[in-house]
Each structure stands twice: as C-alpha cells, then as structure tokens.
Amino acid sequence: MEGKCDGSLSTVIKGLFIRVVSSTCVISRLVIFLKGNNMLIQYKKNIEKFHLFTPMTQFETEVLKKVSSRIVILCLLLTVPVNSFRLWKMLYRSDFTIFTFFCMYIQNMSMYYVETHFTFLCFILYQKFVGINKDLMALKIDTVVRNKYPFMLRAREKYGKNFNPVDYNRDVLQTLAGGHSMANFVEQLKVKHRLAREAVNNLNDLFGVQLGLSMCSLCLFSMFDLYYHIRGIMNPTKSNILLYGWILQYSVRFGSVTILAHLTSKQALKSKILITDINNRYLDKNTKEEIQLFLNQMCSCAIEFTACDFFTLNTHLITSALAAATTYLVILLQFN
C-alpha cells in the first residue's frame, strides 16, 4: 500500500490488514443494527429492576462517572494522536492511499468505541456484584456473631469490629439487628443476583460477535506490526513512535476488555462462596430454603463473558493470545 513492499508475503499481509479492519467493522455494525436496540433495552430493564431493590448511591454514581470519563479520554488519547500523526506523514502522497488509511482508521476507532461501550456497561455490572457481595459479607458476619463460633469468642470483639479489614454493608447489620428477617433479605439478594446475571447474558448476546472479532483482530494487528518492525520494512527511525503507539493501543484495548470481564465474573462467582459460608445448621427453615434456592440459581448456569461461546473473556485469554501470536510470528519470519 505504501510502495515499500519487497516481498509477496509482505504485500499479502498489507492487503489483509485493511481487509480485516473493514470486514470486522462491517460485521460489527450489522450485528448492532440487528440486535442492538433489543438487547440494550433488555439490559437497561434488568438494571432498572435492580435499582428498585437497591438504588445507586452517590458514591457509586461518582465512581461510575469518573471511570466512564477516563475510559473515553483514554480511548481518544490512544487513537487520535497516533492516527493523526500517521496521516500527517502521508500528506505528500498524491494517490488515494491517504484516503484509504483515513477510512481504515475511522473503522478502527469505531471498533474501539464499541469496546469502550462494553467496558462501561460491564463496569456497571461489576458495581452490582460488588454490592451484592458486601451484603452477603454482612450476612456472613451476622451469622458468625449470632452463632458465637469459637474463634469469635476468642476475639472478644463486639458486633463486627474485628471485621474492619473486610468490606461489607454495615446497614445490613443494623437492619438485621432491628429484627428484619434474614430469609427475606436472602430472597432479595437472590433476585438482584438473577437480574445481574441476566444483564450479563444481554451483554453476551449484544457484544459477543463484536468482541470475538475485536480480540482476534487485535492479535493480528499486533503480530503484523511486530512482523514489519522485525523485518525492517518500515524505517525504524521514523516508525518507532507509530509502532509503539499502535502496540500500546492494541494492548490496552485487549487488556481492558478481558481484565474487566474477568473481574466482573470473579465477583459473580464470589457470591457463591459467600452464600455457602452463610449456610449452617443454626439457621431457621425459611432462611435455609432461600439459601438453597440461591445456590441452585447460581449453579444452574455459568456467569461469564464469552465471545460467541468460542472463548471466555478472562486473564487466561491474554496468555493464550501471547502464545499464539508469538508462534505465528515465528512462522511468518521463517517464510522469508
């Protein structure tokens, strides 16, 4: 594309690079057109139902605003400067090369915006699961104190003081101390957890195809850039800044999606551990029944983010992608 190809494989890769960007963008826009409104409406309905039980606190709202603004700023910082600098270097071209690259960068940014939208919606669910776990931790503390386990007697601490390092909802302890039924409280947590789980499924249905294409594309882009750099096709003195900027962009995009999805899934699974710890023989019959229903609900289906069910978005995906990209990069270099 830039008149610097000295081998057939390089020419094929250059053409493949643009085709990958175009095809992933087209498929992504098509999926949003077909599923976007319906799935997003269902997601918002589940979140609104969740807020009927527990409205967002002022602190959660402020954190969400800060995170969302920083995500958008990071998206702009990683895309606009490096792409603008690349286009500025191509102003001397008299053909349609600069127009082709401009369209490619716009498509690439649109994919990044989709990933940013997913990250924002995923963080909302992360907050919901964290809130549920704080309530469950408070129930666990209440159960331990009421049953006076031996290690609690040795501690000789009053209601929850020895749990200062643990993050839990202190309002729940006050509510239970006032005579509120634990069975009703567990039932509310069960409903909230189900709504959050359904919201996870909504995001999987909406972003599954796009995230699968994005993860694969980011691996290919990183591998192609490293291939050109190692082969010396691009002038190292002029292209190092671009190379490092693109690699940083791809790494942040890949890491932000996988790590946040992993943390959200981890919080969802943590609820299962906490509710298991709460269950004991000293609870009344109604509470035991609600806890068992809660456990059955969480065990009935996996709570995780996937890309079209082909692979799970978690930290293991990062190591797998690094291993696969390194292997294929070595193969490409051997062809030359």
Image: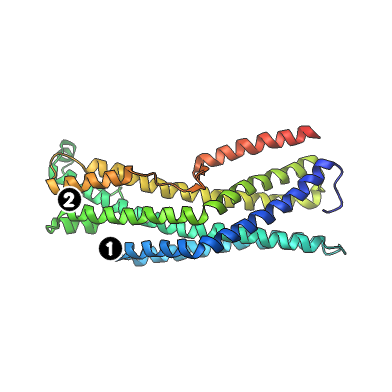
Residue drawn at the location 69% of the way across and 51% of the way down? 20
Residue drawn at the location 69% of the way across and 56% of the way down? 22
Residue at the spot of label 2? 159
User: Could you say which disc has been placed on residue 53 in the image?
Assistant: 1
Residue drawn at the location 62% of the way across and 61% of the way down? 110
Q: Secondary structure at mark 2?
A: loop
- Between the C-alphas of marks 2 and 1, the distance is 26 Å
Whole-percent x, y for residue 273 in the image: 30, 41
Q: Is residue 112 visible?
A: no
Q: Secondary structure at mark 1?
A: helix
- Going by the picture, which residue comes out furthest to the front? 34
Whole-percent x, y for residue 275 in the image: 26, 45
Local crowd size for mark 2, using a 10 Å CA cut-off: few (<14), some (14–19), many (≥20): some
Whole-percent x, y for residue 89 in the image: 80, 60
The amino acid marked with disc number 2 is: Tyr
The amino acid marked with disc number 1 is: Phe
Whole-percent x, y for residue 284 in the image: 12, 46
Q: Quadrant of the C terminus?
A: top right
Position of 260 with respect to 144 (left or right) is: right
